[in-house]
Amino acid sequence: ILDNFTELTAELTAELTARKKQYEYYRKQLITFGDDVPMGMLGTVATNLDSKRKPVKKGHREAGEYPYYGASGIVDYVSDFIFDGDYLLVSEDGANLVARVTPIAFSASGKIWVNNHAHVLKFETYVERKFVEYYLNMIDLSRFISTAAQPKLTQDNLNKITIPVPSITEQERIVEILDRFDTLCNDISIGLPAEI
């Protein structure tokens, strides 16, 4: 019985790896544009809310229900929040900016607290936010990252990143496809990850 489960898990894992490669291929195809699509600087497409962030040292945090975000996602849960809505958080510093082991751009929704290790961007629509999230996680950002003592993506450099700005209809089409792929590859409640 255990041998059968081990074999099934290996097959499913191989299939999931193939799906992830397929997802990366389609993401690149869908988000690579020619000269016919206008480009814009991220600072003009999103509202930067970095000035509202507040770091709280671990010893001073009061445990609670609200996610406390850092450069790579949730690092704790606290008793209060400073943001309430839908945001795109982008890693500001840390080795992951170069290594890219986890996504450097990730959506956060609801009542949250964000420290000074993640930039906070607000968009008009879900589609615009997800489109930029997919784009930032795909492109090489090395020319925007300073590598002094620790890799850092300053707010000024973040705002200078140029992104394609296709029509909202095209963004909706792309986001719908990539959301489905992302769910198939990463959602542990359905599909291959759930089976594994």
Image: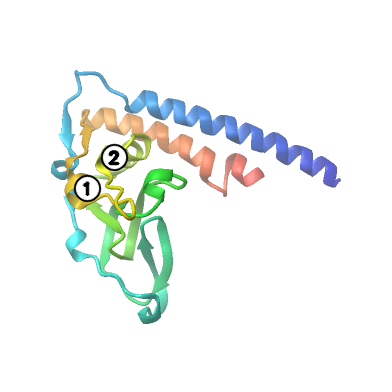
Name the kind of residue labelled 1 in the image.
Phe
Please name the residue that numbered disc 1 is placed on.
123
Regarding mark 1 in the picture, which secondary structure is present there? Answer: loop
Q: Quadrant of the C terminus?
A: top right
User: Comparing marks 1 and 2, which lies closer to the viewer?
Assistant: 2
Q: Mark 1 vs mark 2: which is more N-terminal?
A: 1
How far from the left and from the top, in percent, is residue 184?
53, 38
> Which of 114 and 146 lies nearest the eye of the viewer?
146
User: Mark number for residue 132?
Assistant: 2
Badge 1 density bin: few <14, some 14–19, many ≥20, Cα 10 Å: some
Where residue 66 sits, quadrant-wise, is: bottom left
User: Is 172 on the left or on the right of 72, as rendered?
Assistant: left
How far from the left and from the top, in percent, is residue 65?
42, 72
> Which of 59 and 129 lies nearest the eye of the viewer?
59
Q: Quadrant of the N terminus?
A: top right
Looking at the image, the residue that sits furthest to the right is: 1
Q: Residue placed at 27% from the left, 49% from the top?
A: 153
Q: Is residue 54 above or below residue 183?
A: below
Q: Are marks 1 and 2 in contact (CB under 8 Å)?
A: yes
Name the kind of residue labelled 2 in the image.
Val
Regarding mark 2 in the picture, which secondary structure is present there? Answer: helix
